[in-house]
Amino acid sequence: MCVWWYMCVWWYKAGMDVSGGNHRHEAPWKRMSKEELDNQYSPSRWVVRLGAEEAMRTYSQIGNEVTKRARATGRSLLNVPYGDGDGEKLDIYLPEAVSEAMPFLVFFHGGYWQSGSKDTSAFMVNPLTAQGVAVVIVAYDIAPKGTLDQMVDQVTQSIVFVQKQYPGNQGIYLCGHSAGAHLAAMMLLADWTKHGVTPNLKGFFLLSGVYDLEPIMHTSENAPLLPALEDAQRNSPLWQLETAPTQPADPACRILVTVGQHDSPEFHRQSREFYQTLCQGGWKASFEELHDMDHFEILWNLTQEDYVLTQIILKTIFQES
Ligand SMILES: Nc1ccccc1C(=O)C[C@H](N)C(=O)O
């Protein structure tokens, strides 16, 4: 009798875990030590082809080089202000044939809201501009200068700016990597009415993102960003969409959630849960685990036209899938 009772309880709890409804109480990170959480949320420790430090170095090096190349080869408008603040600048990379009706891809870099820059993040510029897509790389005030709330607000403003500057755009697609995927995902909750314009958002490409910030509160690297649970919840698209689902303004708006095969189990869990929550909320979402990619390769391979993600992005923008 006792054994049966325990088995039933276990089965019930396991069921709640998969269904997602009650996962917050059963979330695996709650059973992790601080060391394990630090490990799970340090993407550089999970790369397979390089050491952690070498991976970070290579990542900035590639970012630096491709950005220099993109600025040297194509037409660009650099350091365009989208707000009054010093840090509120963006770079616009234009395709050769500029028209009123270009699609735009707006990119938000990662770096755990504390590092990274638009000046080292022009990874996807060449393959996309070659196909007629304008690419915008946005700077925002990373911590400690900016708080998470300010970053979310700046990202909102940057998108409003693009829409106002290019009202004839053929769609604005948001793309973000890591912390930048978090910022892009926060735009699913944005209230555009107070900005006087609703951007023509047609798609989201979320790469190796973090959507529930609660576990991050307990990591050494990010604890200072999130002083209280309310800060984490307010800035968690996963938590927000679960507690107060929003509806897509455009039901055709696509959301692609991607994670690298070599990303940590916590990064996989975050992406899967976010994808499931989006589906339950009626969003047109898809999920892609990118084969043999780590947290950084998933992004820097966007310099390549034949990379599976570059192809998915182009097909989505040109409505071929
Ligand atoms: N610089 C980055 C750029 C993109 C994404 C993450 C980072 C990180 O810094 C992650 C963390 N510090 C790590 O050591 O894995």
Image: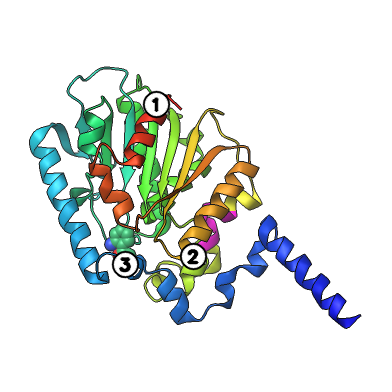
**Figure quadrant of residue 22:** bottom right
Q: What element carries label 1?
A: loop
Magenta segment boundaries in residue numbering: 232-239
In the picture of the structure, the residue carrying the numbered disc 1 is: 171
In the picture of the structure, the residue carrying the numbered disc 2 is: 266
**Where does the image place residue 128, in percent across and percent down from the top left?**
26, 32
Q: Nearer the N terminus, badge 2 or badge 1?
A: 1
Whether residue 22 sits left or right of residue 238 in the image: it is right
**Where does the image place residue 60, in percent across and percent down from the top left?**
19, 58
Q: Give me the residue at 52% from left, 41% from top.
A: 286
Residue 206 at least partly seen: yes
Q: Which amino acid does label 2 sit on?
A: Glu
Q: Does the residue labelled 3 lie within 8 Å of ligand 1?
A: yes
Q: Is mark 2 on a helix, strand or loop?
A: helix
Location of the N terminus (image quadrant): bottom right
Residue 139 at least partly seen: no
Using the numbered discs, state the Cα–Cα distance from disc 2 to disc 1 in whole angstroms: 32 Å
The vertical placement of 67 against 293, above or below, is above
**Figure quadrant of residue 155:** top left
